Amino acid sequence: MEKDKLLELFKSTGALQHGHFKLTSGLHSPDYFQCAKVLQYPQYNEILCGEIARHFHDWRVEIVVAPAIGGIMVGQEVARQMRVRGIFAEREDSKMSLRRGFEIKEGERVLVCEDVVTTGGSVQEVVGIVRKAGGTVVGVASIVDRSKTSINFGAKFFPLLKMEVPVYQPEACPLCKENVPIEKPGSRKVDAA
Ligand code: ZN
């Protein structure tokens, strides 16, 4: 899918919002991206993950592993389309691990899937789990890459979209200077009817 079409899909589903936001980091930004807003539509998840499944079609992937929670919907859909197992790693005492009896076999060819890569920390942890189990990471895929520098996972990295989001220190924020009302993303409550 072309970049413009992807951005249009993100906007129409509310995944990408434009305004004046205070991020959890405390920085201000004119853009806010919440991948779950687009993935909540199975038909869009199918299209987006289809691009990943096609890209890695000839890589003999045997299992998809995703970091919870964000990566689960992507990993599961990619696994479904590739007709392979799909599992996820989750945080336990702040450390990523495989639970629920999930296993990676020695020599298994693994595709790691994430929704959004920002620092790449969670993906790096999953890559570490796979290698420790004796698996081979054939690639890493994500819907969006928001990293500032290109991250080296030691395997082919395939994001559908590289997205640059401007961030400002509050005191240097041009939107604050223009008195644009600020909001905290995700804090808007939806009232029950
Ligand atoms: Zn601001």
Image (tube, rainbow, N blue to C red):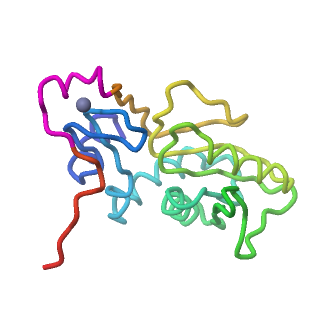
**How many numbered marks does the figure carry?**
0
Please determine whether, in this image, residue 85 is positioned above or below residue 3: below
User: In the visual, does 85 lie left or right of 68?
Assistant: right
Please determine whether, in this image, residue 168 is positioned above or below residue 95: above
178 in the magenta segment: yes
User: In the visual, does 88 lie left or right of 46?
Assistant: right
Residue shown at 81%/49% (left/top)?
A: 131
Residue shown at 32%/64% (left/top)?
A: 41
Could you say which is closer to the camera, residue 50 or residue 58?
A: 50
Question: x, y (%) of residue 152?
Answer: 66, 30
Residue shown at 81%/53% (left/top)?
A: 135
User: Which quadrant would residue 103 be assigned to in this image?
Assistant: bottom right
Could you say which is closer to the camera, residue 4 or residue 69?
A: 69
Question: x, y (%) of residue 189?
Answer: 22, 64
| Image quarter in which the N terminus is found | top left
84 in the magenta segment: no
Magenta stretch, residue numbers: 170-182
